[in-house]
Each structure stands twice: as C-alpha cells, then as structure tokens.
Amino acid sequence: MTTSLLSIILPEDLLLYFEIISFKELGDISTKKDTFHIYLEEKNELPMGYSKLKYESKGFKSSKQIQDFPIRGKAVYLHIKTRRWRDKDTKSKEISNDYSFIAEGSKLTTELSCFLKATGRDPRRYDK
C-alpha cells in the first residue's frame, strides 16, 4: 500500500504531525485473521512556544499501539512514536507534544471510539 493511499484512510490531520515509516500486513494468531500495521514517527518539530535554540531532539518515547477503523475486514493498528526534546542548558527538563489521537481510557483512535458509540456498540469490547 502506498503512502498516498494510506494518507486518505488515516485519521484526519495525522500526517500533519507524523510521517509514515512502514506498513505491514501480518497474521494475528489469536484471531487467525490478517491485520494491517502502520508505523508512524513524529516529525522533528518542537511544540509551539519553545525555541530551537534552547531545546534539542533526544530521540523518541516508547511506541504506542492504537486500533483504528478496520479496512476490508482487517484490523488496523497504528504504531505511533512521539519525540522528546531536552533543554540544552539544564539537561534535565524534557518536553514533548501531547496528542489526543487515543480516546481516553481506551486503545482506540478518537474517531473509531466515537463511531462505535454512535452505533450503540461498546468500545471496551474492541479494546484488546
């Protein structure tokens, strides 16, 4: 699947802040079905209000896996890595962007969680 096609199906505005690193179609042993895994990394842009002169990029936080809308009956998982920046002077203060792509209390994208609520389905059932 190409990056341009993935940009159409991913949650709105996600690609403003993240780059698609890779895409894999894998089999899930527990469900015996194929799944799509999309790997994204945050672009190297400081959070608003911070100076590039004062902060330096220090890699990524651990990856978060969230579930998004199924495609052609296959589960879709987004693996999102967010960056962290460190204060050049103190070396102790770290900052990062706070994204709300995950619905509170679940491992689903906000869009998928709202969709499931509207259809009367309990999103906790899909939070595995």
Image: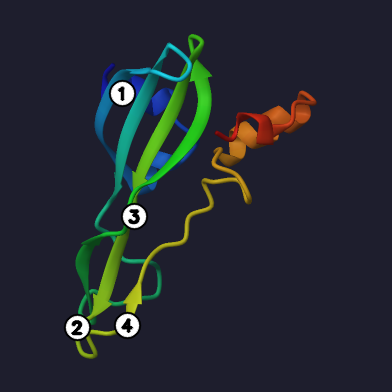
Relative depth, front residue between 20 and 73: 73
- Residue where numbered disc 3 is placed: 82
Amino acid identity at mark 4: Lys
Label 3 and label 4: CA atoms lie apart by 17 Å
- Taking depth in this image into account, of 88 and 80 the one nearest to the observer is 80
On residue 4, which mark appears? Answer: 1
- Which element carries disc 2, helix, strand or loop? loop
- The label number, if any, that marks residue 88 in the structure image: 2
For image coordinates 74% across by 31% down, the residue present is 122
Alpha carbon of mark 1 to alpha carbon of mark 3: how far?
Answer: 22 Å
Looking at marks 1 and 3 on the same chain, the residue that comes earlier in the sequence is marked by 1
Write down the residue under mark 4.
93
Mark 1: amino acid: Ser
Name which quarter of the figure residue 48 lies in: bottom left
Q: In this view, does 101 lie above or below 46?
A: above
Residue under the point 48% across and 16% down: 31
* SS type, badge 4: loop
Q: Residue furthest front?
A: 30
Badge 2: few (under 14), some or many (20 or more) residues near its Cα, within 10 Å? some
Amino acid type, callout 3: Thr
Tell me the amino acid under the disc marked 2: Lys
Q: Which of marks 1 and 3 is in front?
A: 3
Instruction: Give the mark, 4 or 1, whose residue is nearer the N terminus.
Output: 1
Foreground label between 4 and 1: 4
